[in-house]
Image (spheres, rainbow, N blue to C red):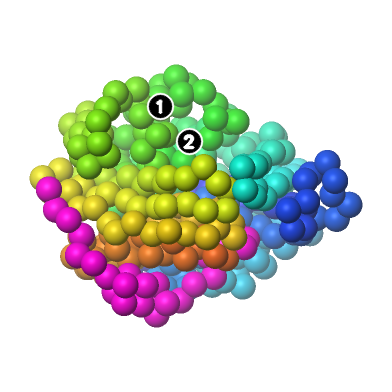
Amino acid sequence: MRVIAFGEVLLRLTPPGFTRIVQAETFEVTYGGAEANVCAFLAQMGIPASLVTRLPLNPLGDAALWHLRRFGVGTEYIVRGGERIGMYFFERGVSQRPGRVIYDRKHSSFACAKRGEFSWESILEGASWLHSSGITPALGGELPGVLEEAFRTARKLGVTVSFDLNYRETLWGPETARATLSPLMPYVDVFVGNEHQVREVFGFSCNGERREYLPRLARELHERFGVKTVALTFREGSLAHLSRIGAMLSSGETTWFSRMYEVAVVESIGAGDCFTGGLIFGMLRGFPPGECLEFAVAAYCLKHTVPGDFGVLSFEEIQHLALGMFSPVTRR
């Protein structure tokens, strides 16, 4: 049982506390990235997980490698090359002031990756799962083609493919995203997304109560792209430090809704990636769908209490929240 993920590692710079970027005289330094976050989560759960990416051959690239290894993430398929590591600045939100992200990743080592640098047949041989997100093709260049090659190889080898939409409007618009992602979607077995992003990118129009329109959204994805499993997260609240969160899982025939959590937010960066990691973990471990969903949402909830990109969590505390405060999921 081995998971492979493909995506960029970023150097993250954060002003201390709730200081704004324009006020900052120092920055907290860490490393992360959507696919790296998923790998770190799975590695902590005892699932072998390796990241495929491209990093510069300099001390910043070395530091990113060390950070991944510290959390048990496999780095054996990482290519070294290019001139710079991608970066982002994160300003924490509080009260009515939302968090803010500024990217500095143009011409990064990963964004300049080329076809032929990743030997997907060798990388995926013996793997159980391949994961990536919409951020990877959004970086442009040859990455959409590289990702399609990875997905196509995974399908050929019988490797399960998961894809988190992870739409970032600072990287591309919905029309460009739709045109780029639609050819990739038929390779996807497990789709993860935020309800609002799914509607915006794919142009789905759904009205009414959430328990009515989310199954319709999932059905659109099942029917349009042939996706086997759809997981959609949602959140409510107008304050940056308080949220109400939950999720829905669909198999095409049956849907499950999780319990809702009231969350006091320390940091939301990486929370969706912990949801995805929890979903992958539960599916690999053979959890029943309802229990798989509850585990993923419990991980999603707990990551909001941990600063940094990676969710520093244990199986026991996630399972305790998922089962100790458990109320049965509702089925449709």
Which amino acid type is marked by label 1? Glu
Where's residue 207, x and y in %? 27, 27
Quarter residue 57 falls in: bottom right
Region in magenta: 307-332
Where's residue 55, x and y in %? 66, 51
Looking at this view, is 29 or 129 the one in front? Answer: 29
Please check the rendered image and state whether residue 321 is part of the magenta-colored stretch, yes or no. yes
Label 2 packing within 10 angstroms: few (<14), some (14-19), many (20+): many
Q: How many marks?
A: 2
Identify the residue under disc 2. 167
Disc 1 to disc 2, how far (Cα)?
9 Å
Q: Is residue 65 left or right of residue 154?
A: right
Q: Residue at x 41, y 22 (%)?
A: 179
Residue 143 in view, yes or no = no
Q: Residue furthest bottom?
A: 316
Determine whether label 1 and label 2 are within 8 Å by CB: yes
Q: Residue at x 80, y 55 (%)?
A: 27
Where's residue 182, x and y in %? 35, 27
Looking at this view, is 213 or 44 the one in front? Answer: 213
Identify the residue under disc 1. 200
Which amino acid type is marked by label 2? Tyr
Q: Residue at x 46, y 41 (%)?
A: 166
